Amino acid sequence: MKREETIALIGNPNVGKSTVFNALTGMHQHTGNWTGKTVEVARGEFVYNEIKYTLVDLPGTYSMRAGSPEEMVSRDYLLENKAEKLIVVCDACALERNLNLFLQIAQINKNILLCVNLLDEARKKGIEIDLNKLSKILGVVVIGTSARKGKGIEEIKENLEKITPCVYKIPFDNMENEEERLKLILHHAEKIAEQVTVLTENKAKSRDEKIDKLFTGKALAFPTMLIFLSVLLFITITLANYPSQLLSSMFSYCEEKLYSFMLSTSCPLFICDLLCSGVVRVVGWIVSVMLPPMAIFFPLFTLLEDWGYLPRIAFNLDRPFCKCGTCGKQALTMCMGFGCNAVGVTGCRIIDSPKERKIGILTNSLVPCNGRFPTLIMLISVFFVGNGAFQGVKSALLLTLVLVCAVLATFFISFILSKALKGKRGSFILELPSYRTPQIAKTLVRSVFDRTVKVLLRALIVAVPAGAIIFLLSNITVENISLISYISDALDPFARLFGLDGVILLAFILGLPANEIVIPIALMAYSSQSTLTQGTDNFAIGEILIANNWTLVTAVCVLIFTLFHSPCLTTLITIRKETGSVKYTLLSALIPTFFGLALCFLVNIIGTFII
């Protein structure tokens, strides 16, 4: 191998930069946080003509004037000359805006290759780019690509050794005012784009505009969002039942076999029970309850993202979030929270303003993650829907209503925090990308490995010790009464103020590692068992709860507290990592908990008088 070179890949957001990166590096890549920051940067390697290239996929940025941690990472990397060469990726559908960034970068005289991506999308919109003319004007190698289809990737590799500094210079004439310099660069970008762009009939643009009248119009935007959410939930609820039952049966079988094997090795009975009936059973509950909804919800969510609908959600919710003192980017992180609050907290990195980023983190757990969905669905099914026709549809609609209440609570708490926290409002640049056909295979792989598996592993890490603790509390007795009974009895008077009981409150406390085990803990305590109850259907669970004096008021209060209580331990650890602050970690736990208890108290008072 002759030598090694480092190449940085940079461009605006939503230009297909990561697709180009993946096409060049294949599976030889990894992602990690930038030193000293919580900004993820992907790196990959590939070999071409006996040269080993290290490719760095820098965060997307619109300008060298950085406004967010991600943009600062990209700017600093370029200014520190850490890469021998650059590949600037542009969107052929918006060449003028993308050339603005290219010309800013070119002023520091980097060796640059210009990749004009999404040519297939541009042709659909009636846009043709004269790549040869663009190359002559800029004096750099220009390669046209359709990276999603793999077109143009080999040409990039073939031209890597031909990369030279950009010869196009902008006459600033000792202009020192940065704002004036940026306006002059934009003027040159407009002029160049005009020279190399040919417009024909734009059928795709007309199609996108018609779709946007439905998805972003004043009258239909919010009803359409609710329909999408209801359908998404209906699919998740309906399809998750079957794999959940299968996984539950599989774990029960494995638990029995492991128990028999450990007994055959003369392992002490207490250790067998601790590992099998304690740890393995809790892990089994979490996997069987948590994995199927995630495996369905995350791919569907990612398909909407890949199609281009999620930016429309941010656009629709920007105005209400602005009235609450934040911005539409919080809508995206809030949507991530429906899958996993830890992922939603991490997603708050996209929010530029430190103040608004904190608000997004502090309020993310106000929307329920998929770990709370099984409890919500059980409560809705047993106490509000019952058996009968269209049970799945009714459950999905009521769950949608519950989630709308969670969003309204997010608005309310965000408004209060925007008044309480110091700091400046951030700017919000939102690009509505073209609607694109989702890449189903890649979407499934990305959602499974980047989201589902990571979230599940984090949950399992905290579930193992939780299983052991729950088992010990249930099996250590004083005068034939378990510790879990003593604790729940002590909590009972306090819990009654909020329409709950000691068992429910203790279940939420012990369920801190993972929300999925709250109801199993309550069932175990109600049934006076020493281990978690094996999985059963919702209505059998409902009979146990009703037998232990649950009323409609109790169900409503538990539903409210399921929505609004401390995020799980995984999310709290993520918040501590993202904020670097114990104070904000505690606030993230206390804010939803106090809000939930206050609502439960009101419902309990009103319910007492009515009933």
Image (tube, helix red, strand yellow):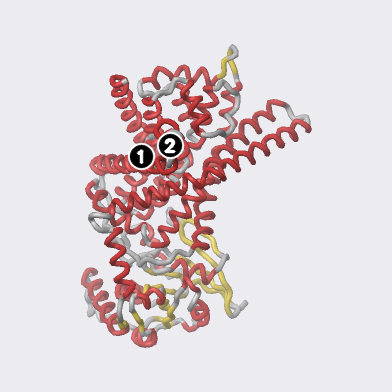
SS class, disc 2: helix
Name the residue tied to disc 1: 402
Look at the numbered discs 2 and 1 and tell me whether their residues touch, using CB distance below 8 Å. yes
Query: Looking at the picture, how far across and down is residue 302, in whole percent?
Result: 44, 56
Q: Is residue 110 above or below residue 241?
A: below
Q: In the displayed image of the protein, which residue is found farthest to the top?
A: 479
Q: Give the distance between the C-alpha atoms of the residues marked 2 and 1, in whole angstroms.
A: 9 Å
**Residue at the image point whose x is 32% and y is 40% from the top:** 405
Query: Which mark, by number, is residue 322?
Result: none
**Residue at the image point whose x is 26% and y is 49% from the top:** 321
Q: Is residue 58 above or below residue 161?
A: above
Query: Looking at the picture, how far across and down is residue 176, in whole percent?
Result: 22, 72
Q: Is residue 5 above or below residue 291?
A: below
Query: Which mark, by number, is residue 376?
Result: 2
Q: Is residue 391 above or below residue 491?
A: below
SS class, disc 1: helix
Q: In the displayed image of the protein, which residue is found farthest to the front?
A: 389
User: In this orientation, which residue lies closer to the viewer: 351 or 50?
Assistant: 351
Q: Amino acid at mark 2?
A: Leu
Question: Which quadrant holds residue 171?
Answer: bottom left
Question: Which quadrant holds residue 464?
Answer: top right
Q: Amino acid at mark 1?
A: Val
Left or right of 200 in this view: 347: right
Q: Is residue 398 visible?
A: yes
Query: Looking at the picture, how far across and down is residue 37, in whole percent?
Result: 42, 54
